[in-house]
Amino acid sequence: NTDFKALIIVKDAIRVDGGHYTLQASNVAGTKSVPIIVKVLDRPGPPVGPVQITGVTCDKCSLAWSPPEHDGGSDISHYIVEKRETGRLAWTVVASDVVTTSLKVTKLLEGNEYIFRIL
């Protein structure tokens, strides 16, 4: 802290602690109140579902989703889309650098059933 600045660190803040606050400072000269916005930095929440699946053919489909409600205090740089055949346990990365909220998935096998997830 200095005569012109003060730093406040709130440990263990969580996402819901962010928002609009009023900061009030007082000294012998008086009291001053100013509105402030607190942004808690965290990892982003999950994309908002449900995932929309359209354009289904024997070997491809299109996926679309909505961005997370909470971005973690920063713009979302990319998404990772994974798929899993319903009869298997392992997830396979379809694309690791999706910068929009949609993706055309290709190279699917006819007759297989898939589960998709967006990270």
Image: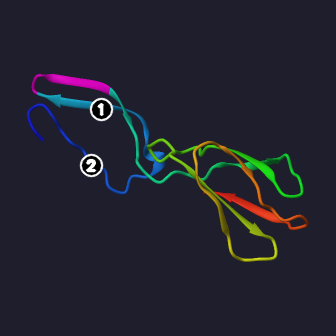
Locate the C terminus by quadrant.
Answer: bottom right
Q: Is residue 56 left or right of residue 39?
A: right
Residue located at (62% from left, 42% from top): 100
* Residue position marked by numbered label 2 in the rendering: 9
Residue 99 place in picture, x, y as percent: 58, 44
The quadrant holding residue 115 is bottom right
| Range covered by the magenta-colored residues | 28-34
* Residue position marked by numbered label 1 in the rendering: 23
Pointers 2 and 1 in contact (C-beta within 8 Å): no
Farthest-out residue, front = 107
Residue 53 place in picture, x, y as percent: 81, 49
Residue 7 falls within the magenta-colored stretch = no
**Amino acid type of disc 2?**
Ile
Residue 30 falls within the magenta-colored stretch = yes
Q: Which SS type dominates the magenta stretch?
A: strand
**Amino acid type of disc 1?**
Leu
Residue located at (23% from left, 24% from top): 32
Q: Residues within 10 Å of mark 1 (few under 14, many from 20)?
A: few
Residue located at (80% from left, 62% from top): 108
Residue located at (16% from left, 22% from top): 30
Locate the N terminus by quadrant.
Answer: top left
